[in-house]
Amino acid sequence: MSVRARGRAVVLLSGGLDSATTLALARDDGFECYALSVGYGQRHIAELDAAARVASALGAREHRVMRVDLAGIGGSALTDPRIAVPEAPTRGIPVTYVPARNTIMLALALAWTEVLGARDIFTGVNFVDFSGYPDCRPEFIEAFERLAARATKASTEGGGACRIHAPLIEWTKAQIIREGVRLGLDYGMTVSCYQADEQGRACGRCDACRIRRAGFQSAGIADPTRYQPR
Amino acid sequence: MSVRARGRAVVLLSGGLDSATTLALARDDGFECYALSVGYGQRHIAELDAAARVASALGAREHRVMRVDLAGIGGSALTDPRIAVPEAPTRGIPVTYVPARNTIMLALALAWTEVLGARDIFTGVNFVDFSGYPDCRPEFIEAFERLAARATKASTEGGGACRIHAPLIEWTKAQIIREGVRLGLDYGMTVSCYQADEQGRACGRCDACRIRRAGFQSAGIADPTRYQPR
């Protein structure tokens, strides 16, 4: 399919497994992809290096890292070094939840979409094998799409509303992995771990690592993740 | 009324006339106010100094400046120095519109609100004497409130939804100014101009200056704005 066939899309790309698969899907669907990563003060900064590798490997037209300081307000194990990343399952929404993170990321994507004259945003949020974050639910994505339809210049000038694509939202992790492998994606490039080391090697114990590892097992596909030496 | 009576609120504070009035109203309403300014690469950086003065004068509990680089994506006269600020009225949405600015600012406010355990956000958006920006309309604010009700930890754990207060949204500029003066606000501290100089002196010619000046005239109140020498 021609790369130009469906126009431009902004794809949120964290550097993890889900967003890399989303980029592969958007590209396969014929979109010209503009990959957006957000540096929000996350402790697992290796994911931004991973995002750059994935964007390049998957032929993104441009890869942009926007920075916003959420570490200053804290409130999450991912942005406040005084809060430990849990290494066993916890009840309720875990402390790795980052307040309003997906709202902020989609808002930044919306801004870039408007500047690019695009109408499509892709996000890799997932509602099945996930950590219970509120801003990964279908009703959240639908509410953001309704907001976007009232937020932009195009929405008042009749240019058409912006579509929020969340293709993985109802897939299991195993389904996601199988689809990525089918599209030729090398998951060895991606970093999901919340406390990856500087080389991007995973801890194997955090929520993100556990869900990812179980996904490869369930898919019956060899796990290419590089783990830290025990 | 006791400052503690209504709990904490995050108040978006640009340093202009509307947001300063909004902070005065929130405080008068009994909220403990946390003022949030966003440095997004705007050319009129003097407004951030004005925000600090206003936050201090109105007894905000804390004033935080969050930075996010919208200048990198451009698309507005306020963030791209190659696009001139218009000095006469234009048709349609003017080039001073910043893509998705209010969506981003409300998203950042939502994050801080969650960390503070607050349930109230104030914004000074206005739909009457305004520049036609899509993200100043009542339907935009309502859509954001619906989004917030699905975006946060509290929204899934039964902690109650977040209210988005836009008290000025249907007021004329003259009404806003009269109310601020009644509350003792010194508008000489505020900077509305899109191209204020380093001392915060206004150009007197841009859209923001024209609307502001007309507001003081209509209110029959002496304009305390400091203008640049012609």
Image (cartoon, coloured by chain):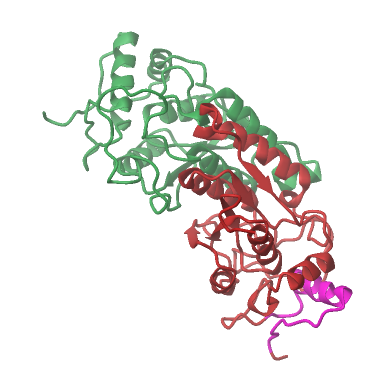
Chain colours: A green, B red
- Tell me if residue A148 can be seen: no
Quadrant of res B49: bottom right
Q: Residue at x 61, y 34 (%)?
A: B149
Return the residue found at the far front.
B1
Q: Residue at x 70, y 65 (%)?
A: B21
Relative image position of residue B180 (x, y in whole percent):
74, 69
Residue sitting nearer the eye, B161 or A134: B161
Vertical placement of residue A92 versus B208, above or below: above
- Tell me if residue A217 can be seen: yes
Relative image position of residue A218 (x, y in whole percent):
33, 9
Say how many tags the image has: 0
The quarter in which the N terminus of chain B is drawn is bottom right
Vertical placement of residue B210 versus A39, above or below: below
Relative image position of residue A82 (x, y in whole percent):
27, 45
In magenta stretch: residue B158: no
The quarter in which the C terminus of chain B is drawn is bottom right
Return the residue found at the far left.
A230
Quadrant of res A192: top left
Classify residue A175 as left or right of residue A220.
right
Relative image position of residue B52 (x, y in whole percent):
53, 70
Return the residue found at the far bottom.
B229
Q: Residue at x 69, y 58 (%)?
A: B124
Vertical placement of residue B156 versus B85, above or below: above
Q: Residue at x 59, y 29 (%)?
A: A141
Residue sitting nearer the eye, B194 or B87: B194
Quadrant of res B51: bottom right
Classify residue A169 as left or right of residue A114.
left
In magenta stretch: residue B216: yes
The magenta-colored residue range is B202-228
